[in-house]
Amino acid sequence: MSDLPDGIEEFLGKAGWGGADIDPIPGDASFRRYFRIKSAGGKKAMLMHAPPPHEDPKPFLHVAGWLSDHNMRAPEIYAADAAQGWVLLEDFGDDRMRDWLDDHPAGEAPAYEVAIDALAALHQRPPGPFAPYDMPTYLRETGLLTEWYAPAQGLTVDKAAYEAAWEEALAPMMQRQSPGVTVLRDYHAENIMLLGDPVARAPQGLIDFQDALVGHPAYDLVSLLQDARREVSEDLESAMLDRYRQLASPDHHFEADYARLGAQRNAKIVGIFTRLYKRDEKPRYLDLIPRVWAAMERDLTHPALGPVARWFDSNIPDELRHSGGGTIT
């Protein structure tokens, strides 16, 4: 028990879980840790430790409360001490959508259908009390590509023209974000927990939503259907977009806005994955860049992305683009 954080047993005791078994879960985050908790009576829970000043569990608690209040399947919060970084919450089990599909490939379509249905339901709710996904945020995110990827490839690029191209491409979409919808921002197969068989339309649990903003409904669709971590075929992507259209009846700009946000998110992820390697010494993310790059190239073919596509034509060599972003060393 010596490797457990200070204060863990005191918190559990105050929460009514004194004497419970504590099983650390291996993780990738440097400051946030998770533990499986089992009481003497057999009750199970998940314990998150996100200690300040490096972490702050208050946004997670804020979004979780709003989602639960609006009948979305966030984990129930049993107890919390935000000042010390403790959150005791419902344990959704081990069936991440990504892992379940590895073992049950025939269940792919039903699993994605349930995920699409959940997004459509979320978008029928009023937007949550969260900050807007505004232009400065979009531009800051796309800037990760020129900040990290371009230097890693030894490229000297026109950063001012890059930002201007993105602003021109995204500007027509911004008015369609008002009043907007709640955007979870990382809604994909590794952050969706299966609480039963998708074929039977069992509900799916939401996690990793603490950075929620109010923005465009296409964003989380891109996150799900142009998944950096799991291959989603273009046929499945098309079928799920059709399903969403049937459920949500988006306006005639939807296809263009989906392409805009696909390119925006994928440019951001290329930058993030490069940063994880160059700054954080996590090279495994490099293998995912070709998939992200290929999706971005598809998005850039839409006329709505004309200014950005022209920037790529002028600043990123063909040999890198045709090789999925090239090899980063």
Image (spheres, grey):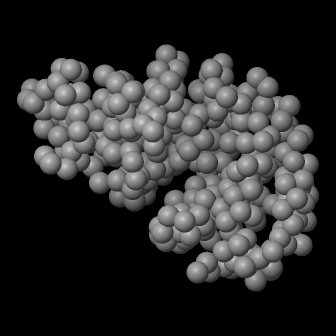
Q: Residue at x 61, y 78 (%)?
A: 328
Task: Decide which of 35, 246 is in the foreground and name it.
Answer: 35
Residue 306, can we see it?
no
Residue 277, x across and y down, in percent: 53, 69
Q: Quadrant of residue 61?
A: top left
Question: Exactly how many numbered labels are in the figure?
Answer: 0
Farthest residue in the top direction?
Answer: 69
Q: Residue at x 66, y 48 (%)?
A: 222
The quadrant the C terminus occupies is bottom right
Please state if 86 lies on the left or on the right of 10 as rendered: right
Residue 151, x across and y down, in percent: 71, 73
Residue 171, x across and y down, in percent: 88, 41
Task: Decide which of 319, 99 is in the foreground and name it.
Answer: 319
Q: Quadrant of residue 213?
A: top right
Please state if 121 lies on the left or on the right of 95 as rendered: right
Does 294 appear above or below 203? Answer: below
Does 90 appear above or below 318? Answer: above
Does 254 appear above or below 129? Answer: below
Please state if 24 lies on the left or on the right of 250 as rendered: left
Q: Residue at x 44, y 32 (%)?
A: 57
Q: Quadrant of residue 186?
A: top right
Does 108 appear above or below 293? Answer: above
Task: Decide which of 178, 225 is in the foreground and name it.
Answer: 178
Residue 35, x across and y down, in percent: 26, 42
Residue 259, can we see it?
yes
Task: Decide which of 238, 94 is in the foreground and name it.
Answer: 94
Q: Residue at x 13, y 38 (%)?
A: 21
